[in-house]
Amino acid sequence: MFKGAFSSIAQYSAPLRRFGASSVARIVVLAVGLSAMTVYTVPDLQRSAGIWLTACLWCCLAYFTVECAVRARGAFRTGETKKYALSPSGIVDLAGVFAVPIALVCGVMPNTAWLLASLWILKLAQNSPGFEQLGRVFVLEAKALASVLALFLIVLFLTSAAMYLIERDLQPASFGTLPAALWWAVVTLTTTGYGDEVPQSHLGHMLGAFVMICGIATFGLWTGILATGFAAESRRRNFIQTWDLVSKVPFFQSLDPSAITEITHMLRRLEVPERTAVIRRGKVGDCMYFIAAGEVQVDIKPTPIRLGAGAFFGEIALLLTDSVRTANVTTTMPSSLLILDLADFRTLTAHHPDLKRAIDLEGQRRMAENTGVRDLQRLGSAAPS
Amino acid sequence: MFKGAFSSIAQYSAPLRRFGASSVARIVVLAVGLSAMTVYTVPDLQRSAGIWLTACLWCCLAYFTVECAVRARGAFRTGETKKYALSPSGIVDLAGVFAVPIALVCGVMPNTAWLLASLWILKLAQNSPGFEQLGRVFVLEAKALASVLALFLIVLFLTSAAMYLIERDLQPASFGTLPAALWWAVVTLTTTGYGDEVPQSHLGHMLGAFVMICGIATFGLWTGILATGFAAESRRRNFIQTWDLVSKVPFFQSLDPSAITEITHMLRRLEVPERTAVIRRGKVGDCMYFIAAGEVQVDIKPTPIRLGAGAFFGEIALLLTDSVRTANVTTTMPSSLLILDLADFRTLTAHHPDLKRAIDLEGQRRMAENTGVRDLQRLGSAAPS
Amino acid sequence: MFKGAFSSIAQYSAPLRRFGASSVARIVVLAVGLSAMTVYTVPDLQRSAGIWLTACLWCCLAYFTVECAVRARGAFRTGETKKYALSPSGIVDLAGVFAVPIALVCGVMPNTAWLLASLWILKLAQNSPGFEQLGRVFVLEAKALASVLALFLIVLFLTSAAMYLIERDLQPASFGTLPAALWWAVVTLTTTGYGDEVPQSHLGHMLGAFVMICGIATFGLWTGILATGFAAESRRRNFIQTWDLVSKVPFFQSLDPSAITEITHMLRRLEVPERTAVIRRGKVGDCMYFIAAGEVQVDIKPTPIRLGAGAFFGEIALLLTDSVRTANVTTTMPSSLLILDLADFRTLTAHHPDLKRAIDLEGQRRMAENTGVRDLQRLGSAAPS
Amino acid sequence: MFKGAFSSIAQYSAPLRRFGASSVARIVVLAVGLSAMTVYTVPDLQRSAGIWLTACLWCCLAYFTVECAVRARGAFRTGETKKYALSPSGIVDLAGVFAVPIALVCGVMPNTAWLLASLWILKLAQNSPGFEQLGRVFVLEAKALASVLALFLIVLFLTSAAMYLIERDLQPASFGTLPAALWWAVVTLTTTGYGDEVPQSHLGHMLGAFVMICGIATFGLWTGILATGFAAESRRRNFIQTWDLVSKVPFFQSLDPSAITEITHMLRRLEVPERTAVIRRGKVGDCMYFIAAGEVQVDIKPTPIRLGAGAFFGEIALLLTDSVRTANVTTTMPSSLLILDLADFRTLTAHHPDLKRAIDLEGQRRMAENTGVRDLQRLGSAAPS
C-alpha cells in the first residue's frame, strides 16, 4: 500500500540523487523527526532524554534545510526562484525550515516551538500525483458535494435547536446552551458518538435516532458521489498517461487511429525499477507486456536475450493452451511497461485480426528460435518492421 | 468545495442584484445571524452582550425581510404571488421572516423565540440544483432504499427484543424497558456507539457483535444503492444540460445526429465568471474548449484577439507533441464553455476523421497567423463556415 | 422513501381488498401493535394503562389472524395449503398469529409473552421484491463478501489475542480474558466505539489505531463489493422487467431485434395509480412516455382525449425548442408507463432515423390537430399502424 | 454468505479426501479449537474445565498436524518440499503446528502459550481465491489509496498538534502529551469515538467537528476508490475464468471470435455440487444454462434424459411467452455451468440471428420430442453438430 507513495516520492526526488540522499532516507528522516517531536512532549521522557531528542530534531531540521537549499539552488539556476518560493512545494519546504527557528527566536518555549515540526508531515503531499487526482475529483463533483454539505448543515442546525429545547431543562450541563447541542449533533451526525452528551428523554431518543439515520444517509450520499467522481477521473487520467506511452511503441503506429484509441483504453501502465522480475517461469500468465521505455532481459538458454523499447513479451502464454510462462523476464534498467490483460487481448484480437496475426507470427518465430537457439539477438527488434 | 454552493447561490440571486445585495453578502448575513443566535443561548454571553446580539439578530431579520419583499414584489408583478407563497422557496422566505416575530408577539421568551432563527439555514437549500438531483436519486432508488430501511427496522426490533430479554435482569437501569433496548439498538446499528448502554453478559456481547456487523452490512447496501443511483442520475443530468449548450455551437451543427449524440456524452460544461483565466501559457494542456455563450480573449502578441460564442480554442496543445499551452486565454464576460478532454478528443477524431480535419485546418491556420500576425480579428469567427 | 415499500405492500395485498382491508390499514395496525408492545414493557405505563394496551394488542392480533385466515382460505381453494404453510410468507403469518397465544398458554408471563409480537415486524419483508433483489446481490457477490468476512475474523482474532497479552495485567477488569478482548475488538473494528473498554498503554494505543484503520478498510471493501454487485443486479432486473412491458407496446414491434434490445436498456418503468397527474402543462419536459398498460387522458381543449395501451405521449416537448409541456396528462386507471429520457431519446433517434421520422410525423399530426381540433379520438390509436 | 468460503475450502482440500477429512470437518475443528482457546483464558472456566479444554486443544493441534503432514508428504513426492515450506500456505500450516509446542517447550505459561493457537484463524485465508482478488484491488489502486493514507496522516498530525496546544492546560490528564492527542485524533478521525478523551473548550469543539468531517470525507474517498477498483477487477477476473469454460463448450466454437468475446463478457459461472436441483418445474425462468463440465439429468416423462458437457438447457422458458420452467433439472455429478441471463440472451440473439436460429431449432426439436417421447437419449448431444 505504501509502494505507491514511495515510488512517487522516489520519482520526485530524482534531482536530489546527486546530493546522495535517496527517497528512503527522506522517509526515514521524516519518521524519526516526527517521532522525536512526539516523544519530546512527554514530560518524563523530555527530562530523561531531552538532550538526545533535541539533537535528533536539529539533525532532521538540518537535513530538510539542505534539501530545501538544493532545490532553491536548482530553481535559482533556471531563474525560477520566485516561482519556487510561491509554489505549494516551496512553501512546504520553507515552512519546514524556518517555522521552528523563528518560533525559538521569538522566545516561544522549546517544547511548544518544536510542535511546528509537525508541518514536516506536509512533505508527504509534495508533488504527489495522487493528491492532484483527489483534488480534481472534489472539483468535478463540487456541486453535488456542496449540496450534501448544505444538507448536513441544515440537519445539524435544526436538530440541535430542537434537542436544545427538549433537553435543556433536563440536562443543563450537557444541553444547556446551543453550542453544546451543536457539539452533540456533530458528534452524532458523523456517527462518532463519544457519549459525553446523550439525550435522556424519550423525545430526545427519537430525535437522536433520526439524527443517526440522517448521518448514515448523508454519509452514503457523500461516498456515492465520491465513488462516481473517482471512477470518471480514474478513467480519464489513465487514458492520458497511457496515450503518451502508446505513442512510443512502434508496434502500435501501424494501427489505424480508432484501433489505437481502443487499445489505449485497454492498456495499463506499470513503472518497474531495475533488476526486478516481471515474469517468473512456470507461473500462469494472464497478460502480455509492451515496453514503452527501458529494457528487459529474457532468460532463455543458452544465452539470455534483451528486448528494448518498442518490443513486446509475455504473449506466448496467451497463445498456449496451458497459459504457463516459459521464461523469466527481468528488467535491466528502470522501465515503463504497458500491460494488456488476457480479457482485453482476446477482445482486441477479435476486433483486429491483423493485429492477432502479427503477434502470432512473432510468437511462432520466437518459439521456433527458442528451440533452434540462434539469432537470439534479433528478438531485440521484436516490433513488426 | 464551497465553490459549487457559492456559484449556485450566485446564479439564483441574479434578480437581487438590482437591490445591491450580492450572494456573498447573503452568505455573510446568514453566517452572522446563525452565530449570533447560537451565542445568544449561552447565559454568560447573553448577560454581557445581549443587547448587541439582539441588535445583530434584528438586522439579519431586516435583511431577510427586504429580500423576501423584493421577491414577493417580483412575483406580484408577474401575477404569481400565490404560486410564490406556496413554493418551497417562498415558504422558507416567509418562515424566516415571520416565525420569530410571531413567537415574540405570542409571549414566548426571547431566548426561545430566537431559536426559530435556525430556520434561516433552510435558505442554503433554496433553488439549489444539487438538491433536486439528490432528490431524484432518492426517488429513482426508492424501492431499494425502502427495502434497506425495512431490513434496518426488522433487525432493530428483533434484536432489541432479544437484548431486553437477555439483559433486563442484569441491568434494569439500562435495559429495563423495551424503549431503552430500542435506543441501544439504534445507537449500535448505526455504529454511533455512545456507550451509555452496553451489554454485559456473554450472550449480550454476542448479540451486540451481530448487531454491529448487521449495521455495517446495512450501511454498505445503503451506500452501494446511492452510489449506483447517483452515477445514473449524474450521467443523465449531464447529457441534458450539455445538449442545450451543444445546440448553440455552430461547429457541431454540421455533424450528423449520431456524432452529435456521441460528442454530447463526452463534453463537460463549465461556467466561468468574467475576467478569469481559462488557460495559462506554458502549462501542459489536456483538453480543448468550445464557447457556448460569452467571449474570451486570447493574449497573443502584438494584439490580443477575441473569440465569441461558437468558436473553439485550446486545440493547439492537443495537436502539438509537447502539449504546452501557447497563450493565455481569459474570459471577458461570464461564459459557458464546453470542455473536451484529451481522451475523448482522440476517440472522437478517430471515429470522425472529417472532424479532425476541420480542427487541424483551423489549428494550422491559427499557428500560421500567430507567426505572420495579421488578420487576427478573423479568428473571432473560428467556427467552420 | 416509504413510497416504494407502500406500493409493494399495496400490490401484494390485492386479494385482501375484498375483505375491505387496505394496505395503509395494514401498516397502521402494524405500527399501533408494535408501539403498544413497546410501551407495555415500561412498568409505570403497564400499571396505569395496562388494560388498554392489552386490548390494543389483542385487536392487532385479531386483525393479523383474520388476514392469515383469508390467505389460508385462498390457498386452500387452489389446493396449495401446504405450500402456503411452508412458504416464508406463510411462516411469518402463522408465527405472528400463534406465537403469543402459545406462549401465554404455556404459562409465560404476559409482559414476556407479548415480546413475541415483535415477530410482526417481519411482515414488512413479506413478498417485497426489494428483498429478493438484495438477496441476489449477496448471492452474486458471496465469494468476495466471504473473503471480507474472513479478513474481518482474522484481524479480530489476532488483534484481540495481542491486545489481551498487552493489557491483561494493566486492566484485568476490561482485558482480563480473551472474550473481553474479543468484545473490544468487535466494538472497535466496526468503528462503534462504546468506550467501555479502552486500551491504556502506548502499545495498546498503537494496536488500537491499527484495528480502527483496518476497520475502515474492511468497511470500504465491503461497501465497494456491494455497490458493484448492486449496480449489476439493478441493470439486469431492470432489463427483464422492462422487456415484458416493451413486448406489449405495438409501436416497438416494427423495430428490428437489435433496436428493441437497445431501447429496452434505455426505458425505465413507472407504475402510476389512477387519477394521478403524469405531465403538468407549462413544466419543462425531459422525457416521453409509452403506455404499456392502462389509459391516460390528455386535457386539450375543447375535448380531452384518451390514449390507451400502445400509445405514446410527451414527445412534443422533446421536439420543441423550449421543451415546455403543452397539456396536462392524467391517468384514468392504474397504468404501466415506460419512460424514455431526453438523453436516450436523442441517442435512439440518432441511431434509428426511421424511428425519429415516425415520432415526428405523429407529433406534427397531433400539433396540427391541436390547432384544428378535429378527429381527436383518433389519437387513441397513436401507435404506428 | 459463508457458502463461498466453504466451497473454496472444499475445492482446495481435494487431496485431503483420501484421508477422510472433509472441508466441513476442517471448519468444525477450527471453530472448536478457537472456542476452546478463547474459553481457556477465563480463569473460572480454566479451573473447572481446564483439563477438558486442554485435551480439546491438543486434539485440534493433532488434526492440523496430520493435515500438515499429508500436505508435506504430497509436496515431498513432487519434490517441492522447500517450495511448500516457503509458500504462504505452508508457513500458515507450519506455524499452526509448531508455534504452541515450541512456546510450551520454551517454558511459557500454558495459558499464554495457547494464545498462539489464534494463528489457526489464518487457515481461513489459505488458497482462497477471494483474497488474491482483494490483494489485486489494493495493488491496482495502490497510488490512490496511498494518497488517501497520506491525507489521513497529514490531518492526524496537524490536528493533534493543534488540539494538544488547545487542551493541554485544560485537561492535562487527557491531552497533556502529544501521543495522547494523537490517540484522540485516531479515535475521532476513524469515527470510532470511544469518549475517553473529549475536547471541552469551544475551540476544541470546533477543531473536533472539523476532524470528524475530515474523517467522513477520507472514508468516502477510500470507499470510492475501493469500489472503483473492485468493479474493474471483478470484470477482469470474471472474463478470464469464463473464457476457460467457454472454450470447453462446442456450441460456441462455431461462432466467430468477436461473438465469442461478446458472449464471454455476458456469461456467469456457477459451480454446482452433485444431486443439486438447478431448475425446478413451474418456477419462472430468467436464464439458460450451458454445461462446461459435468452432467445434468432432465426429469421428463416417461424417461429422464441426461445432458453432458457441451449441451445447453433451460432455453425453452426463454422462448415461451409465460417463461415457466417445463421440467426439473438436477446435476448427477459436480458440474460447471455457464449462465446466460435473459437480458443478455436477448441482446446476443439480436446481434447474432444465426445463434438464435440454432437455439430455436434445438428448442423446437426438444419440445416436439417432449410430446412424442422418443429418441430422448439424443438430447445428450444437444450441441449443434
Image (tube, coloured by chain):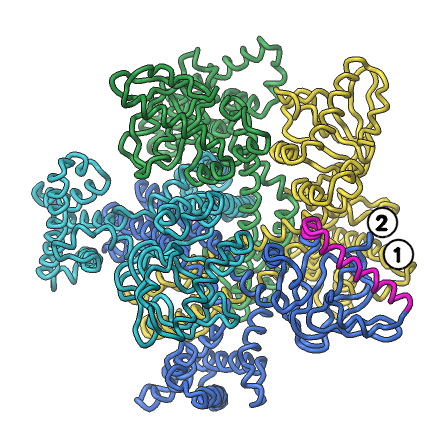
Chain colours: A cyan, B green, C yellow, D blue
User: Where is mark 1, residue-wise?
Assistant: C74
Please say if A140 is above or below C137: above
Please say if C206 is above or below C46: below
User: Where is mark 2, residue-wise?
Assistant: C15
D341 left or right of B374?
right
Please say if A363 is above or below A226: below
Within the magenta stretch, is there residue D371? yes
Query: Measuring 10% from the left and 52% from the top, which residue is drawn there?
Result: A62
Classify residue C256 by image quadrant: top right
Mark 2 and mark 1 residues within 8 Å of each other at the beta carbon: yes
Indicate the position of residue B204 as horizontal and vertical percent values: 54, 67
Q: Say which of D241 and D132 sits in front.
A: D241
Secondary structure mainly formed by the magenta segment = helix
Of the residues shown, which amino acid type is indicated by label 2? Pro
Query: Measuring 50% from the left and 13% from the top, which residue is drawn there?
Result: B70
Which of the image's four quarters has the N terminus of chain B? top left
Q: Say which of C117 and A28 sits in front.
A: A28
